[in-house]
Amino acid sequence: MIYRINNFNPGPAALPLEVLQEAQKEFVEYGGRGMSVMEMSHRSKDVERLNEETQQLLLEILGLPPGYRILFMGGGASTQFALVPLNFLKSGTVGRYIVSGSFSEKAYMEAITVGKAEIIASSKAHNWRRLPDLNDVQLGADTAYVHMTTNNTIEGSQFRALPATGQVPLIGDMTSDILSRRFDYTKFSMFYASAQKNLGCAGVTVAVIREEMLKECPERIPAIFRYSTFVQHNSLYNTPPVHSVYMMKLVLEWVKRQGGVAELEKRNIEKANLLYDVIDVSGGFYRGFIEKPYRSLMNITWRMSDVELEKRFVQESERNGFDGLAGHRSVGGLRASAYNAVSVESCRALADFMIDFQKRNG
C-alpha cells in the first residue's frame, strides 16, 4: 500500500495518484525513445506533438470555439500581472481592475508601474470578507480592459457571476478555480492560470487568448514579453517547461476520465459543503472568514478563538495525517484547499477531525 497524506496545500497542491503513477512509469523513458521527456529537445517531433496535443485537449475541456489560442509560459500568474498591461495598456487608455483580494491587488499594483490603471470595484474596506458589487461598474470609453481574479486563494472567496463589460475585453486570473466548475469561458477575451492547483505541477502557466487580442501586442516591448511571440512560435519560442506540460497533459486526460468539469464540479460542491457544514454548526468554535454568499469551493477558510488554538489545530492535524491547513502567512487562520485532485474521502476525514477537535477543545 502507498501511504498518501490528506493534502490540503494551496499550491503546489495535490495531484491525482494515478497521474503520478503514470508519470512514474515514463519518468526514465518516454514513448519508447530511450530517454526521459525532460531530456528531449524541445525542437523534437515528440515534444512538438506533446505540446500540440496538450493545447488541443485543454481547448476541448474548456469548451472553447475556434478563435482562441493556448499559450504555455513561465513565471506563474505573478508574471502575467505585469505582462497583461505591458501588452494591452496603451498610452491614452486605462486598465480597470476589480480588486477582491491580495492577488488581484498585486495585479493592479503591477499595472500602475506600466501605465494608467484604476480600481473600479474593491472589497478591501470589508477586509476582503465579501466580494465587491459588480452591478454598477462604470467603464469609460478609454478602458483598455477589465481585470479580475475569479477565486481568491488566500481569503477564500469566489465570484459566481462576471461583470458585463460589453465590447471591453475582460481578462481573468483563474489560477485557483480553472476546471473546477462549469463556466462560459467565452466571456473572457483572455484568462490565465498557473498550473500548480488544478492543471498540473508548478513550472508552467497557461494563458488563453482570443486571437483578435493579439493585434494589440506592441512591438516596443521585448519579444519574450509579447503574447504574439508565443502564438507565432506555438509556445516554443524558447525552451518551454516540457515536463510540466507533460504533467498537464496527464492531468487533463484524468479530468476527461472523471467525466469532465461537470462531474468535478459536483464533487467540489460536496467536498466544500462537508467542511462548511462543520464550520456553520460549530456554534462559533470555527468561524468562517468569508461571508456565506461569497464562499469559495476551492479554498475554505476559517478562524478560531485565538492564535494558540489555531496552532494546536495545525499541529494535531499533521499528527493525524493532514497537511497544508495553516492559513496564508499574511493573514493567518486556517485554510483547506480542496482542488480537483483532493478526494471526497479526504474532506470527510478532515470534517471528522474538526468535529473531534472541537469536542476535545471546545
Image (cartoon, rainbow, N blue to C red):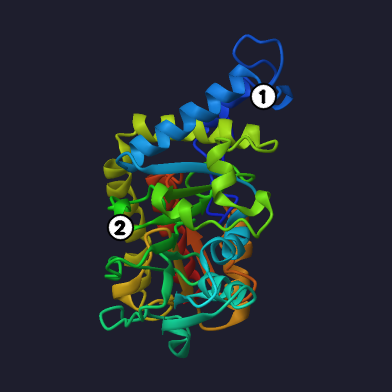
Q: Which residue is mark 1?
A: 43
Instruction: Identify the residue at horizontal 61%, vertical 55% (top origin).
Output: 219
Instruction: Identify the residue at horizontal 64%, vertical 54% (top origin).
Output: 225
Measured as percent of width and height from the top left, residue 195 is found at 54, 47
Mark 2, other Cα within 10 Å: few <14 / some 14–19 / many ≥20: some
Q: Give the spatial CA distance, label 2 vs label 1.
A: 34 Å
Lateral position of residue 110 relative to residue 182, left or right: right
- Residue 187's label in the rendered image is 2
Measured as percent of width and height from the top left, residue 8 is found at 53, 54
Instruction: Identify the residue at horizontal 46%, vertical 73% (top origin).
Output: 302
Along the line of sight, the residue nearer the viewer: 356 or 131: 131
Q: Can the viewer see residue 205 in this picture?
A: no
| Above or below: residue 5 compared with residue 250 | below
Question: Which amino acid type corresponds to the residue marked 2 in the rendered image?
Answer: Lys
Q: Image quadrant of residue 123?
A: bottom left
Instruction: Quarter of the image for the N terminus: give it.
Output: top right
Question: Which amino acid type corresponds to the residue marked 1 in the rendered image?
Answer: Arg
